[in-house]
Every structure is written in C-alpha cells, then in structure tokens.
Image: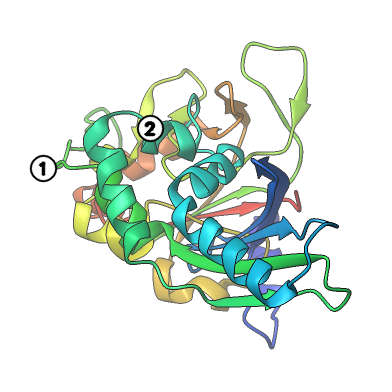
Amino acid sequence: MLIKKALSALVYSLFFICITVVPASAVDGITTDTQISWTTGDIVITASAAIPDSATNITTTRFRLTESIDRDLTEIVTNAFKAIYLDSLHTLADGLSANSSVMSAFDEINLSKTRVSSSLSLNLTSVTNIYKYNIYNELIPILTSRKTITAPPVELNYEATAAFSGIIIYAADPLPYYGENASGLLQPAIFPKIFTENMEIVASADMADPKRLSEWGFIQYTESLSQRDYEHRVGLYPFITTARGIFGNNRTDILIPDEDAKKILYNKANRRLIEEGRIVIIIGKL
C-alpha cells in the first residue's frame, strides 16, 4: 500500500533514465569508462590512449592511436564488460567469452562498428574514441540462440486473482543477502532471476520470448517512482510487490513474498507478463 501511494504521489516531468557508471579498466595502456542506461539498454564505451611524450607529430600519432583502438576493439570492450553483470554468477565479458561462436559473433559486430566520435584532448596528451552498443538488439541475440520458451511455473493451489498489465518490484532499499548475515543494494543484470522466499523460481530470462528480449530485455531497472516513466512497459494496472531479499554471488537475483509469487503464477494472463518481459524493478542509486 505504501508503495502504491508513493508511485501515485511522485510524478516527474522529465523522462528518467537509470544510468550506471562502472569503474575504469585498461588494456595495454588504453583506459575505458563505461556508462549503461538500463532504460534504453545503451552502453557507451569511452576508450582513451595516452600520446607518448616522445611523439614528434601529433597528427600522425593521433591517427595511429585512433586506428589502434579500432583494431583492438573486441579485446578492449570485452575487458570493459567485466564490470557489467550478466547473471548471478557471470559478467557480460564471461558471456561473450563463453564459446568461440559467441566471441566470433561479437567480433563481427566490432568489425562493422562505427565510432560515435574520436577526439584529441585540449592539452594534446590523449586520444579518445567513443563507441555505443545496445544490450537488447545487439548483444542479447548473440548471447542466446534459443528459439523456444521455458514456460513459467504454474501455481495450481491458489485462489483466482486479477489479471494485471505488468509487474513492478520495489527493491530500492538495502536488502538481506539470502543465507548470509549481511545486506546491501540489488545489482542490475542482463539476465537476473526472481525467486520466492523459499527459493522457488518465479521468473527467468529463459521464460521470456526471445523477440521481446531483443526488443527491451527481460527486466527494466529504474530509480524513478513515477509509474508514468515506465507505463509503456507495465501498463495502467500493474501488480506491485516489495522485494524481501537478494540472492547470488553477484547480488543480482531477487526474492519476493511467496503469496505475491502465487498471484503472478496462478493466472495465465499474469504468467504471460513474464514471457513478454513486462517487469520493472525499482532500484536504489548505486
């Protein structure tokens, strides 16, 4: 009830985009910074290389470094993706390096990747290239090759419940880690899982339609309490619940009350919300 009041009371005039900034990484002297929008699925990689003090021709050196970053883009970006979680056990870099076919497909993306921009710093000490990727329509299609859907579990022993237009899970506050005497904030991931407090599976990415995954991913994360910001995803009559805990080595999987899980899984129309990825998780500022 408190969450519903908060959602209806807070309305923002600007569209809120949840962005995560991950730590910088380096490959052979090339430093990268990564920004992720969990709303749009966009990942912006900024790759910078220092100009040696011994350089005598800045123009030539700039061209050489710019081309070097382009040439090593797969290695550079894969290293940057170590800070993005794929699921409770793996990073995005792990997923792309899982087998040769996935890495080959990623390399093909990079071979045709066009820089957003390339620039020389004002003090003439570094060259910076910027690249843009999309989790949903670029990366998810090569991370999963399945064509079928694993049906969500069916809850038979429960009273009939209403059909909802989407699912909103409030998880913005620190939550206890399952099986540990500690707590913290939920970490976003590309393929998180949702469990009951009894660790029964409620939803996972393999229950979602692959076409939906490549359209907007399995889950949308947001810091906004304004339902208008994600109404396009969860509709006008979403089911709202509060997370009870966090599970997984990467702190990405979420536990919801058993009774709320039953309300979702009993109704065929509500199970379809999992297949269509009509799930929004409200997270705290990381």
Q: Is residue 209 above or below residue 87?
A: below
Which three-letter amino acid code belongs to the residue tagged 1?
A: Thr
Q: Is residue 248 left or right of residue 258?
A: right
Q: Residues within 10 Å of mark 2 (few under 14, many from 20)?
A: some
- Say whether residue 165 is visible: no
Q: Is residue 114 left or right of residue 140?
A: right
Q: Residue at x 57, y 72 (%)?
A: 227
Quote the CA–CA distance across marks 1 and 2: 23 Å
Judging by the rendered image, the residue that carries numbered circle 1 is 148
Q: Nearer the viewer, residue 159 or 256?
A: 256
Task: List the single residue furthest toward the left.
Answer: 148
Residue 87: x percent and y percent? 46, 33
Q: Nearer the viewer, residue 257 or 90?
A: 90
* Residue 184: image tag: none
Q: Residue at x 51, y 34 (%)?
A: 91
Q: Secondary structure at mark 1?
A: loop
Which three-letter amino acid code belongs to the residue tagged 2?
A: Ser
Q: Secondary structure at mark 2?
A: loop
Residue 225: x percent and y percent? 67, 66
Q: Is residue 32 above or below residue 245?
A: below
Residue 74: x percent and y percent? 44, 48
Task: Decide which of tag 1 and tag 2 comes sooner along the chain.
Answer: 2
The picture quadrant where one finds residue 244 is top right
* Residue 97: image tag: 2
- Say whether residue 96 is visible: yes
